[in-house]
Image (tube, rainbow, N blue to C red):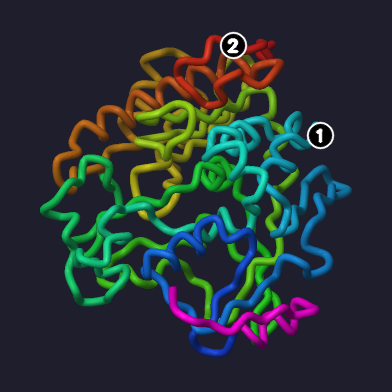
Amino acid sequence: MNRFDYIRPQSVAEAVAEASVPGSAYLAAGTNLLDLMKVGVTKPQRIVDVTRLPGLGAIEWQEDGGVRIGAMVRNADLAYDERFQRTFPSVAEALLSGASAQLRNAATVGGNLMQRTRCAYFQDLASACNRRVPGSGCDALGGENRLHAVLGWSEHCIATHPSDFCVPLVAFDAVVEVEGPHGVREIELDALHTLPGSTPEQETVLEPGEMIVALRLPADAAAFAGNARYLKLRERTSYAFAVVSAAAALAPESGAIGEARIALGGVATKPWRAREAEAFLKGKAPTAEAFSRAAAVALSEARPSGDNEFKIELARRIVARALHLAWEGTPATMPALPASPFAVTSGASHVA
């Protein structure tokens, strides 16, 4: 690990000013940043510690029923908040399916949004990686790539985004509040992360020094509370990143699907919103055929980036299964294995 300056600002404005200096990085829980520093993937010259800044650790319910979540709220605290779990159950389920209990106790909401890919070639300094060293190439393209992207990838990068939390957030039109050198702005979470194109090193739309201060979920997302699920297939159910995952939420209307929300994880460099599949389901009867066809629409642009064609069919099945479980109804209690296809808790029907 290289030597670095450690800075502990007293306000968000001071933190932004310090982090705007080239070579700076924000430190929250450090569950991702410190690992990358230890292996030499990232070498910040200045660490700006935001863990003690005031006003970033609250869960604030809005008058309209939405919620504002401070960037320093811990993942476990949010997932186990009773009102949040009732109002946004699939988001809580996604949080509880990520990492280990120890990491969830430490990791923060803001840090989760900003975590970087777990691609082995990105984390191996002996490998070529355009994301880590622009222009060096992508060894993943000809290497071990069964877990890599099948949507939105380019010849410059086939990595995937690792967050579970972000998947249902994107489905529910979450917004991030950002403060930077030029003031405060809001960014739709779906637009925060970028596809690789020819510049995979540009992982988000954040400008230098900008800091996520809060996350907001709109009130209309709460309307899906009775019929929302997150489903995640992983190689180790106890804790592992998703091979593929899906968030599905349905709004019943006279026995049909009035509105649908669908997003996928583990398939691209960003959480993937399946808007065409959502539109396809509107007004449809909630049948296995409709869910299967919607899943096919969601993956219609998918193509393998290597030895991972199986992920396309797997993702189709996960989407269809998540839709089926969402229609059955959100479970009355959190499954013992959150988001797992092996969970046996059946849904408590909320369908009239």
Q: Which residue is mark 1?
A: 83
Please indicate whether residue 31 sits to the left or right of residue 303 in the image. right
Q: Amino acid at mark 2?
A: Thr
Vertical arrangement, residue 9 with respect to residue 125, above or below = below
Query: Could you say which disc has been placed on residue 345 in the image?
Result: 2
Q: Amino acid at mark 1?
A: Arg
Q: Residues within 10 Å of mark 2 (few under 14, many from 20)?
A: some
Vertical arrangement, residue 76 with respect to residue 287, above or below = below
Q: Secondary structure at mark 2?
A: loop
- Residue 241 occupies quadrant: top left
At x 43%, y 20%, the residue is 321
Report x, y in % for residue 8.
72, 78
Start-end of magenta stretch = 1-19
At x 18%, y 36%, the residue is 309
Report x, y in % for residue 273.
45, 45
Query: Could you say which disc has been placed on residue 234 in the image?
Result: none
- Residue 70 occupies quadrant: bottom right
Give the farthest residue toward the right.
Answer: 63
Report x, y in % for residue 228.
60, 27
Give the farthest residue toward the left.
Answer: 142
